[in-house]
Amino acid sequence: MAINDDDDFLRATIDEAEIPALLPALAQLTGDLSLLRDDLRPDPTDRFSPQGALGDEQLAAARELALRTLADWRDRGCPTAPKFADDQVRRLIEFTTSGALDDYLPLLVEELAHDGDPGRPDWTKAELAADAPLHVVIIGAGMSGLAAAHRLRQAGVPFEILEKNADVGGTWLENTYPGCRVDVTNHLYSFSFTGNHDWPGHFSTQRALLDYFRDFADEQDLKRHIRFGTEVVAAEYVEAEHCWELEVRDAEGSRRLRAQAVISAVGQLNRPSYPKISGLADFAGPSFHSARWDHDVDLTGKRVAVIGTGASAVQFVPIIAEQAAEVHLFQRTPPWLVPTPDYHDPVPSGLRWLLRNVPHYAGWYRFWLFCRSAEGVLPAVAVDPDWAGDPRSVSARNEELRQLLVAYLEMSLPDDPELVRKVTPQYPPAAKRMLRDNGTWPATLRREDVHLVTEPIQEVTATGVRTTDGRQHDADVLILATGFQASNFLTPMRVTGRDGVDLHRRWGGDARAYLGITVPGFPNFFMIYGPNTNIVVNGSIIFFSECAVNYIVGCLRLLLERGSAALECRAEVHDGFNADVDRANLLMSWGKSTVHSWYKNEHGRVAQNWPFSLMEYWKRTKRPDPADFLLRGGGSE
């Protein structure tokens, strides 16, 4: 890699750089650790302020130092960067984090991936047990399924992916509503093992994300392993043969196939939830769920009724409001809005140039974002049992966060105290999913042609929606923004384990799994993004999926090393883990609050969320403990 641009160009690009990422990148590029000046360290107590809370004078000095360093490297012919030892990389990490994340050091070294792909399996099936039968079926070709396929291919484990859709992408293929985009910055919402960091936006759109996963599948030659248009109807464990028999349905009908192991990568947010509202089927006009957007319906000049004000509605309502004659927006519970000024902004051209052209910068930029989000606001949503303050918060820190978010609403809706009252949640921050906003949602609610309705819905009629105050809200089109059946894990697939046990009957609407991955009585059956692996206020779900994949690959290695045919989680390990998770979730905002949320299942239990740190999940999934499992078949019998 070489650069030939002049100093003026470099100066302009450096102005758009994240300095806490650029200085360690340049130090690694040149081998000059003197760039890590104490007076230019990010503030370890303020990871949320821009540029690590560096002041104007510090930024000016850092940018001048970076310019001189990059120009000198250019003038020397852009020499290859020296190889850094782990202790030198730790010095770079310590500069970036200022020691605030020392407990995370092993994870941070791996996340930085300064020397290749540390998550790559260090073994292959051919080396461990070339002749052992091990064929894996992955259900789903979304983000998690592709990650699993990539790691299995690296380990030389035969696999195939069964995907009900005609393309890869999962939720980013299925959700095409206007304004659909990710709410985690894309340089984190991306695989750690790819070098593609050329995102068009800080929080990219559905189309950019779909293209990313399509390109990844093409680059890694994964599509030849995928059976598209193939839905898994049922999976049954054949104990005598230590294998799974799957019933699948495709264009040619139903058939059966077998595999020694199954990985479910079907996700949580893929089955639309339809509200139980009287008369819903009586509406005479076009009606559809936001997750199944009907692009044939022209909203221009139409009266549109939208039921729901969650994540999807906050994204698409501002767009359709520009087309519709009027929008009636029916709100049950308002969401907390997190101020995110750059939510719709493109990545500046200078920053994109640095990511493409300066060695190591993309890795350090992603690393800097990871450090800022590793804990997120997790400490601010933990319950203080002695908290005696406002009941709409769970601790002093949670109350401080609540007041900041209320101030944002008041600032965004000046001179309209009634609207502020309607959109201010009466529950603690993070008890429900908090949504990013750059001012677009409050501005939409202030439009004269957008009407926020907070009275409960009594029924849907042929011509609109009637609320319990007796008012009829006429509409030409009805859109349901009512979320997903998040707690119905693995539905509608039937899964039958050892001794003929049906997994859904066993769960009884209360899904549980060890580490969200494996369940007693269901040998060699694994889940990614399973129960209690959703993260709420920190990190990226891709991080969790990669951790789960690492653990599953480790389980397969254990099978091969022990010469076993089946691996099954011990019941006491599973039960102890879930008891710990339940206790911890009750000590978080989403567990203590009684507000209705998709985080909780029909029994009121938090079946979605992970209540601990990212570090805790990383440590637990680093490698499987053989003592946690029963091994059967082969050399185990």
Image (cartoon, rainbow, N blue to C red):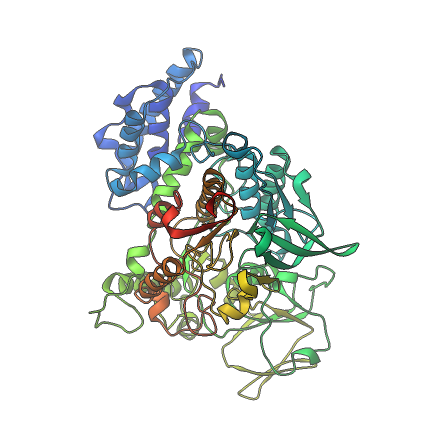
Q: Tell me: 465 left or right of 204.
A: right
Can you see residue 306? Answer: yes
Give coordinates of residue 438: x percent, y percent.
46, 54
Q: Is residue 437 above or below residue 160?
A: below
The answer to whether 360 is drawn above or below residue 381 in the figure is above
Q: Quadrant of residue 286?
A: bottom right
Task: Say which of 435 and 603 sits in front.
Answer: 603
Kindly identify the residue that appears in the image at 23 percent across and 38 percent down. 99
Q: Residue 156: horizontal and vertical position, in percent?
A: 56, 34
Q: Which residue is painted at 68% across and 51% down in the image?
A: 257
Query: Furthest-bottom residue in view?
Result: 470
Quadrant of res 593: bottom left
In this rendering, position of residue 304 left or right of residue 596 = right
**Rendered location of residue 235, percent (x, y):** 62, 58
Which residue shows up at 46% across the image and 18% down it? 6
> Residue 475 appears at what percent x and percent y?
66, 75
Q: Quadrant of residue 426?
A: bottom left
